[in-house]
Image: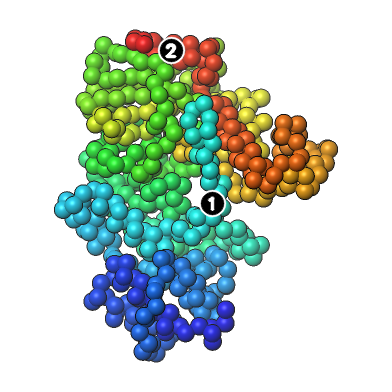
Amino acid sequence: MRSDHINIQYELEKLLAFALENRLIGELDVIPSRNALLDFFRIDQPSTQLVTEALPSTVVPILEKLLDYAAEIGIIQQNNTTYRDLMDARIMGMLIPRASETSSRFWQLAQSESIEAATDFFYKQSVDSNYIRLDRIQKNQYWLTDTDYGQLEITVNLSKPEKSPEEIALLKNAPSSDYPKCLLCEENVGYAGRIDHPARQNHRVIPLSLDGQPWFFQYSPYVYYNEHSIVVNKNHVPMKIGVSTFRRLLSFVEQFPHYFIGSNADLPIVGGSILNHDHFQAGRHTFAMELAPDDYLFSHTSFPYVKASMIKWPLSVIRLRSKNQEQLLTAADHILETWVGYSNENYEILAYTNHANERLKHNTVTPIARYNQQEEFELDIVLRNNRTDEDRPHGIFHPQRRLHHIKQENIGLIEVMGLAVLPGRLKEELYDIGQMLIGASPYTQGMADNPPNPLSKHSLWIEDLIRQYGTSLSIEKAELVLQQEVGQKFMEVLTDAGVYKRDELGLQGFQQFMTHSGFTLVS
């Protein structure tokens, strides 16, 4: 859109009206905010036209016009997604409360109303300021799949825009920088960004104390589930699972009882994508794993007030419940310490191996905490092992090669709980496979021998789908079939990640570990 078709002064007034209506600014902030925007856009005077039209529900339509104008007059260096994203965060950074004001309002609401009111306020601010880009997140494909373990959630991640060849070239030549040290560091608050690091002028965090240590609470800009939040150690220290982890998780749910919280494991392959900065993920969402029933109940004489169980879930999960926090912590720490040193070659579980004169640790856990409806503290401890071998270089307890066409990446906390975050490439690939199932395009034998074809990795799966469903489905039926089949593949992914399989032999092995840990089977 050409700048001479944009009434820039009026669009700035709409932006100010949006910010005022959504309490990003107050009445006394309107004039200084207007002056800052006029200066930024190189405009001498504001519009005299009052904004009487209904404002959009999000700021995005207003920002798009402002960015078009900025590109036309040369404020934006290049008119592409990277530079537009850097610019819109800068604009919204002029219209958002200061970090101290956001924190003060959060804790005032928590004390005068409720912690739910406080998180409602902070989440809304994160959306209204465009820190959470809901317009992009809503592009994600999402569906539920019924399985033996409840309804698994499937999302195809389309919220991250594709970069143009020019943007990729810019990234290749971008100078390196170690400030901020990572995407989670507190120094991101207010940071202007660069072509290889997102702008965060519209980003705010809430300081809090976990087990007497300084941490901070923020929302994830990517929001894979409701109120997806990140709880970050104030210090840039690596992930390490220990009793302090359990203490901090329970400290959080004590302060935020309407949220769950969990930690990725602290080892490669079974951990998350960021291992160099200690952090948790939280939110107001019920995952399928939370609803999983008990398979077997156990007791332990050292922890009489703790209920322990193996739950019905494709990964190997020990659930601990108690109103006694200290006993719960002691039980969780006991399980962790026992598991870290536990080996059982019959199940390919080795706690340590030696490699190049180095002793490598392989056992760890993925812990999740919540405050349940029975007003108990609840810890789910997911047993993990990251060992590899020659036949399974990606991991023995990792999605095997037959599933890599759907999911090859690490199985982290979010997937562990039952939500698949699948790569965006699947949107087009599933559409093309659907065209075969409705007979609109043929399947070519030998597709597996043509790697440049993006469907080649799916060839065996496509052949199986055609054998099972034929090639004359309706469009609606083909879509349902593919959603169900992808969901079943994700269930297999989770099963592969389980250290004990869900057959009789696997359940026996799991019970052996419980017995080894001093637990007695109750029922």
Residue 167 horizontal side relative to residue 240, left or right: right
Mark before the other along the chain sequence, 2 or 1 = 1
Which type of secondary structure does the marked residue at label 1 adopt?
loop
Residue 274 horizontal side relative to residue 18, left or right: right
Residue 2 image label: none
Q: Is residue 332 visible?
A: yes
Badge 2 crowding class, 10 Å Cα cut-off, few under 14, some 14 to 19, many 20 or more, is some
Which type of secondary structure does the marked residue at label 2 adopt?
helix
In the figure, 434 relative to 271: above or below?
Answer: below
Q: Position of residue 204 (x, y in %)?
A: 33, 58
Q: Is residue 333 visible?
A: no
Q: Position of residue 298 (x, y in %)?
A: 34, 14
Quadrant location, the N terminus: bottom right
Mark nearer the viewer, 2 or 1: 1
Residue 140 image label: 1
Q: Amino acid at mark 1?
A: Asn
- Disc 2 + disc 1, Cβ < 8 Å: no
In the image, farthest residue toward the right: 445
Residue 511 image label: 2
Q: Position of residue 507 (x, y in %)?
A: 48, 14
* Identity of the residue drawn at 51% across and 58% down: 136
Residue 120 horizontal side relative to residue 501, left or right: left
In the figure, 214 relative to 266: above or below?
Answer: below
Quadrant location, the C terminus: top left
Q: Position of residue 289 (x, y in %)?
A: 43, 31
Q: Amino acid at mark 2?
A: Gln
Say how many tags the image has: 2
* Identity of the residue drawn at 37% across and 63% down: 128
